[in-house]
Image (spheres, rainbow, N blue to C red):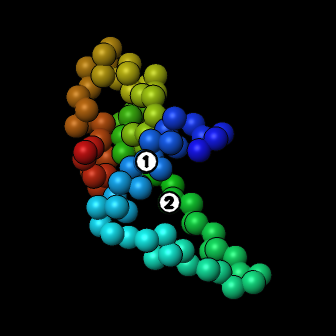
Amino acid sequence: MADKTPEQEAAILSIRKLMAFWHITPDELHVPMAEGERRAPVAPPPPASHKYRHPLTGDTWDGVGRQPEWLRLALTKEGYMVEELRIPDAPPPQ
């Protein structure tokens, strides 16, 4: 397992343990591809829809990544509650 990161080595070890437990052989995992055949490209995930909107400025946030400054200010300085800024048709956070 040369040139593997510790995470890759741990994943390989985990896969080997699962294969041994379930009696899966490497041949069962290998699906040969025809000459010149390419794997279908993986479609990118759909763009995240907006989940929060400031009622006055119209600024939006999709809920991914760092909380934007406008949202932080709306919650801490302007007195808004999270539910007031959530777009009604947006699913609640998990």
- Is residue 61 positioned above or below 76 on the image? below
Rendered position, 83 above or below 22: above
| Label 1 neighbour load within 10 Å: few <14, some 14-19, many 20+ | few
40 to the left or right of 55:
right
Name the disc covering residue 46, or none: 2
Query: Looking at the picture, how far across and down is residue 43, in whole percent?
Result: 57, 66
Q: Residue furthest bottom?
A: 34
Left or right: 43 as drawn, with respect to 74:
right
Instruction: Name which residue lies at 26% across and 26% down.
Output: 80
Q: Between disc 1 and disc 2, whose residue precedes?
A: 1
Q: Is residue 74 above or below residue 8?
A: above
What is the number of callouts on the image?
2
Mark 1 — residue? 13
Q: CA distance from mark 1 to mark 2?
A: 33 Å
State whether residue 59 appears in this view: no
Which image quarter holds the C terminus? Answer: top left
Relative to 92, 38 lies left or right? right
Give residue 17's quadrant in the image: bottom left
Element marked by disc 1: helix
Mark 2 Cα within 10 Å, few/some/many (few <14, many 20+)?
few
* Rendered location of residue 37, percent (x, y): 71, 81
Q: Which mark is residue 39?
A: none
Given residues 64 and 61, the one toward you in this image is: 64
The answer to which quarter of the image holds residue 4 is: top right
As drawn, is 45 to the left or to the right of 33?
A: left
Above or below, comparing residue 72 to residue 82 in the picture? above
